[in-house]
């Protein structure tokens, strides 16, 4: 099973700032990683697929990069609606599909 | 509009059973693989399992934590996905989401396919107490 590790667990950020979230895979997953955003009381929403491809309808402020075992999600110009929990997920090797533990982006 | 709507959650005693449903609309349900994912209160996402489409003989795969207890099925004539929960434990209490597993187009035509979860339902809550 591929273990996905996200860091940090919580990130305190001021509106308008740019943040970078990290996700590490326990073995290479190529570029087969997705990022999801989850707001309180809502279901996850796909942001990024294939490590760097923004999903339909997702604003360009969200960008992903990385390959192999190290991945990042960058969010620029943070606004109130961006404060949420972000999960990475590998879809290279399944079963099982595995998710990271999440990074909570909160208002500083 | 592509939509998934879960139902069937509720309160069940340990050792009990429950069947969750997921109604799909706005897309060709029968063409797609479908997943179940759960989230315990205040915790992260845990993949439960996947059912393939008819072309792939409705083959199912499960997480180790639910093998032998949970069963995924589908009825393409009703655009419906199901999750049968048996022998429920306290640790099965969670919000259960159904999600569409979409084939990554970058690998279409390759001998191996890869799937990410592009559409999620709002979830249904299972309480075990």
Image (cartoon, coloured by chain):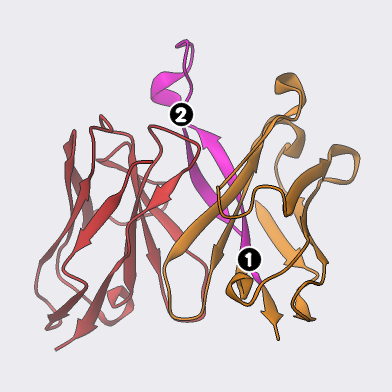
Please give the residue where the numbered disc 2 appears in the rendered image.
B114
Which residue is found at the position 48% from the left and 11% from the top? B109
- Report crowding for label 1: few under 14, some 14 to 19, many 20 or more residues within 10 A (C-alpha): many
Residue B97 colored in magenta in the image: yes
Would residue B82 be seen by someone viewing this image from the given angle? yes
Numbered disc 1: what chain?
Answer: B
Which residue is found at the position 74% from the left and 77% from the top? B14
Please give the residue where the numbered disc 1 appears in the rendered image.
B96
Point out residue B63 in the picture as x, y percentages from the top left corner. Answer: 56, 47
Q: Is residue B118 left or right of residue B53?
A: left
Residue B92 colored in magenta in the image: no
Which residue is found at the position 12% from the left and 77% from the top? A16
**Could you say which is closer to the camera, residue B45 or residue A48?**
B45
Point out residue B44 in the picture as x, y percentages from the top left corner. Answer: 41, 68
Which label's residue is closer to the chain start, 1 or 2?
1
**Could you say which is closer to the camera, residue B50 or residue A74?**
B50
Numbered disc 2: what chain?
Answer: B
Chain A representation colour: red
Which residue is found at the position 30% from the left and 57% from the top? A59
């Amino acid at each position: 099973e591929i273990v996905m590790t996200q860091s940090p667990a919580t990130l305190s950020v001021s509106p308008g700032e740019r943040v970078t979230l990290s996700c590490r895979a326990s073995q290479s997953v190529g570029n087969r990683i997705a990022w999801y955003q989850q707001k309180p009381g809502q279901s996850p929403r796909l942001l990024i697929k294939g490590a760097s491809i923004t999903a339909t309808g997702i604003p360009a402020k969200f960008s992903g990069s990385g390959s192999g075992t190290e991945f990042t999600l960058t969010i620029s110009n943070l606004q109130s609606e961006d404060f949420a929990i972000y999960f990475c997920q590998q879809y290279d090797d399944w079963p099982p599909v595995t998710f990271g533990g999440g990074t909570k982006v909160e208002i500083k | 509009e592509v939509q998934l709507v879960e139902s069937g959650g509720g309160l069940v005693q340990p050792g009990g059973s429950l069947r969750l449903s997921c109604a799909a609309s706005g897309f060709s349900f029968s063409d797609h693989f479908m997943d179940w994912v759960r989230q315990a209160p205040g915790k992260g996402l845990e993949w439960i399992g996947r059912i393939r489409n008819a072309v792939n003989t409705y083959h199912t795969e499960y997480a180790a934590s639910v093998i032998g207890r949970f069963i995924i099925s589908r009825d393409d004539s009703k655009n419906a996905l199901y999750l049968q929960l048996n022998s429920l434990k306290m640790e099965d209490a969670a919000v259960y989401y159904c999600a569409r597993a979409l084939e990554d187009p970058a690998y279409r035509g390759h001998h191996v396919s890869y799937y990410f979860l592009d559409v999620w339902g709002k979830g249904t809550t299972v309480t075990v107490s």
